[in-house]
Amino acid sequence: MAAIGSGKTVSSTYAPVRGWLLLPTWLTIGIFMLMPLGVMLVYSFLTKEFRGGVLWEFSFAAYDQFIFDRGLFGDEAPSIEWTYITIFFRSLVHALIATFFCLLIGFPTAYYIATRPTGSRYLWVYLITIPYWVNLLIRTVSMKFLIRDNGPINQALLNMGVIDAPIHLINTNVAVQLGLFYSYLPFMVLPIYAAVERYNISLSEAGADLYAGRWTILRTILLPVVKPGIIAGCILVFVPSLGAFLAPDLLGGAKTFMIGSLIEEQFKGTASNWPFGAAASMILLSIILAVLMLYARSQARGQV
Amino acid sequence: MLNMFTQRKTLALLFAATFTAGQAQADGKLSIYHWFEYIPQELLDKFSAEHDVEVTMDTYDSNESMLASLKAGKMGSYDVAVPGDYMVDIMAKEGLLDTIAEGELANKGNIEAQWLNVPFDDGRQHSIPYQWGSTSFSVNRDVYKGDISSTDILFNPPEELAGKINMLDSQGEVLAMAALHLGIPQCSTDKDQLKALDSLLSSSKENWASFGSDMAKDVLVSGDAAAGMIYNGFSAKGRAEGANIEYAYPKQGYIVWMDNVVLLKDAPNRENAIKFMDFMLEPENIAAVTNYAQYAAGVKGAGEFTDPALATSPESNPPADVSGVFIAVCDQATQEVYDKIWTRLRK
């Protein structure tokens, strides 16, 4: 903050147009994000039209459907509706586990890359981006081919006599986790890498000189310094995992809805309940906003 | 330098000239909204050449997504679409279809008699047949050798198949099959019957490995599933790919479906849409679709032009003693119960 006082960090080269620099961004966000979001918010409070569409009558029905169960025919006394809570909770757990494993594998990887000599460091970062040259759908389908009961991995293990029966992975939660973890791992590695790269390694050396063990150095010096990178990585993995439907559909067999597939069903499926789809999106958005605000608050507290 | 510049300019002008000429050449346009991979490109080129019409096509992957897209503002941009049977009924009720006047279609007489007065479009006022087929299930005969002529295979499976069944990810087809299994009418309004439907599905779920429509063939060929709901043409292709699968005609009944070319309301090129429908009623043309998609045409004389292997294929020849039914269109109250049953099933 003190830097502003020196008057040198703020360049005056573009001063006359500075106000306009963000205009394209504001326009993009306004037209392609805030306006559709506004439409969704409005739709979530409208009455559903049979077979898709909305009637312009104000209604809480969509949120009511999410929260209250009135039985198969809607004529019973309302009780808590567990269906959607279960679906949301399942997605939440999947996303949390995926984030945990990404962190577990991603942190050492990022640390390793960031501590290489400058030359090979960029090669490693480059290698991390390779999966992104191929479309996510293709990668997920390929993974399905690999892990199926008659797939190459199981066949190889069977032939080598390591296992007697194929390891059944396809259409299980483990397969979904594998898919999520694999899809989003680079999102964890890159921000942590950026944080560790800026880390002054002589801090660790100073710690070692003062007889701190490896674990103590990691816990009390390295982790606090690179924490913003770790949190950014966790958010980048957690948020897309929460709405993911490719991995659950292709690897998990789509036996159970995830948040993403539940919402898709409301717009593209037989249910055609646009207000409910909009309401479910709003609830999902609120959860993500709450998580981000908790993060912002913890950051703010850390600064004091 | 100058020379190169002139050359480029000439080239550019030449391009521009070709482009405008191409535009002026086509007499009119036709905009088709169609399923993915369901019409051979050569057939579109043939129509384009015969009638001097520029054809454009967008595709969709389910009846419901087509309806959603049309209702979300795409009406008026397409001339024809290809909805399934029940969707023709829904679209007509939603007022999305234009009426074909008597005598407007020169080839209407080519429609096979059995497909003329259909429950979803009596007298063919809005549609013509495109392809028809059936939906039932197929079983891997290496895994299970017993009797497969019952819907028990899906809802009360033998030990060998339990936990290895793929269901179509389609509410209409799964619930219609379940209704056939219980012997209750489709779209029943009887509360006890609906409750029975709900509990049948939730109790069968543990026997099912996955839900998926576009991969219904793939899971049977690869062995991920040992049995699965499937469309007849899809099963025939799976057999051709070497899977030892048999398509079943359960005694409780199976599902019949028909896709149809419909005339959309506010069609920007209505005249060309009629020409296209007449074109698709020519036996030779519709047979090209049949050979491509492995289903069946509903046009007299198309058999002459279709692949002879199709005529004897077990997937295209149901036994005489079992019958197929179209999927019914439920009223709003029953549809809402169906939606609830479907969501509970996937909880």
Image: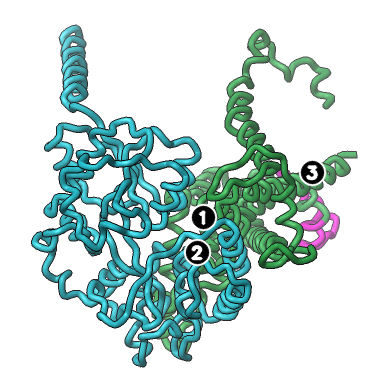
Chain colours: A green, B cyan
Q: Residue at x 26, y 60 (%)?
A: B115
Coordinates of residue A44 in the picture (x, y in percent): 68, 43
What amino acid does circle 2 point to?
Gln
Q: Main secondary structure of the magenta part?
A: helix
Q: Residue at x 43, y 47 (%)?
A: B91
* Position of residue B129 in the picture relative to residue B58 (left or right): left
For disc 2, the marked residue is B171
Q: Label 2 vs label 3: CA separation?
A: 39 Å
Q: In which quadrant of the rendered image does the C terminus of chain B lie?
A: bottom right
What amino acid does circle 1 point to?
Gly
User: Magenta stretch: residue A199 in it?
Assistant: yes
Query: Viewer-proximal residue, B90 or A133?
Result: B90
Identify whether A63 is placed above or below B343.
Answer: above
Q: Label 1 vs label 2: CA separation?
A: 8 Å
Label 1 marks a residue whose chain is: A
**Mark 3: few/some/many CA within 10 Å (<14, 14-19, 20+):** few
Q: Which residues are magenta?
A: A197-219
Q: At numbered mark 2, what does the secondary structure look like: helix, strand or loop?
A: helix
Q: Do marks 2 and 3 share a chain? A: no
Q: Earlier in the sequence, mark 1 or mark 3?
A: 1
For disc 3, the marked residue is A293
Can residue A186 be spotted in the picture? Answer: no
For disc 1, the marked residue is A269
What amino acid does circle 3 point to?
Met
The image quadrant of residue B337 is: bottom right
Marks 1/2 in contact by CB < 8 Å: the verdict is yes
Q: In which quadrant of the rendered image does the N terminus of chain B lie?
A: top left
Q: Residue at x 63, y 31 (%)?
A: A35
Q: At numbered mark 1, what does the secondary structure look like: helix, strand or loop?
A: loop
Instruction: Please identify, in this view, whether the residue under mark 1 or under mark 3 is nearer the observer.
Output: 1
Can residue B133 be spotted in the picture? Answer: yes
* Position of residue A135 in the picture relative to residue B320 (left or right): right
